[in-house]
Image: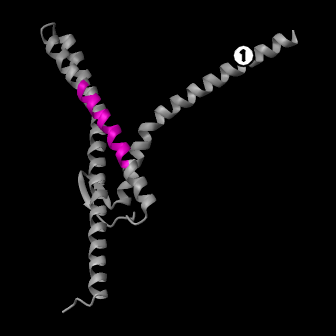
Amino acid sequence: TLLQHSSELSYNAEKLQNEYDALIHHADDIGLPLKHYDDVDRLGVSVGILFKNGVVVRGIAKVKVDNGVEFQNVLDSLDEAIAFFERRSNAAAAANAASLEQMAAAEGEGSKTSLRSKRAIAAAAESSSGSMEYYKRSLVLHEAAIQLLKEAVVDRMNNTTNQIVNALNLKN
């Protein structure tokens, strides 16, 4: 019976480990959207962008392009957020299109079904509006980060040109 008890404990331990792994995966799935919302909110300050009452306010960026690792992390986070919100926005658009088709079909069936369809469309539109807004914000932040990179390249080219001119005494 000791051997049987040991095998039962091993089986239960393996079962608990599998449940634990499934719960961890589920928690990661739940937390993933929050990560992307947080990234967009946090990275705005890093690239010098503030969103205030629907207006984009540009300021001084905190992230430096010359700090390659930090700047690369910003770009990677923005790329992930863009992909996430784009998928969500596309899914919401597909759901809205399906709801519109249902509503058109329901118009002929009576007002009770039509009211239900209208509520479904309103719920889908409400749920997608946050994703669409954050998708737009993530695109603005990405463009600001690329602009920082462009400005850094121009500055570096100007500095290099000035150094060459000074080194070769090409000034008039």
- Residue 32 on image: x %, y %: 45, 37
Q: Is residue 147 above or below residue 107?
A: below
* Image quarter in which the C terminus is found: bottom left
Q: Which region shows up in magenta?
A: 78-94
- Residue 2 on image: x %, y %: 87, 13
Q: Which residue is drawn at 26% across and 78% down?
A: 161
Q: Does the magenta stretch include residue 91?
A: yes
Whether residue 35 sits left or right of residue 52 in the image: it is right
Q: Residue 85 lies in what quarter of the image? A: top left
Q: Residue at x 26, y 21 (%)?
A: 120
- The secondary element bearing badge 1 is classed as helix
Whether residue 8 sits left or right of residue 53 in the image: it is right
Q: Residues within 10 Å of mark 1 (few under 14, many from 20)?
A: few
- Residue 157 on image: x %, y %: 28, 72
- Residue 138 on image: x %, y %: 31, 48
Q: Residue 168 lies in what quarter of the image? A: bottom left
Q: Which amino acid does label 1 sit on?
A: Tyr
Which residue is the site of mark 1? 11
Whether residue 157 sits left or right of residue 74 in the image: it is left
Q: Which residue is drawn at 26% across and 54% down?
A: 143
Q: How is the image coloured?
A: one colour
Q: Which residue is drawn at 44% across and 43% down?
A: 35
Q: Does the magenta stretch include residue 77?
A: no
Seen as rendered, the residue at the extreme bottom is 172
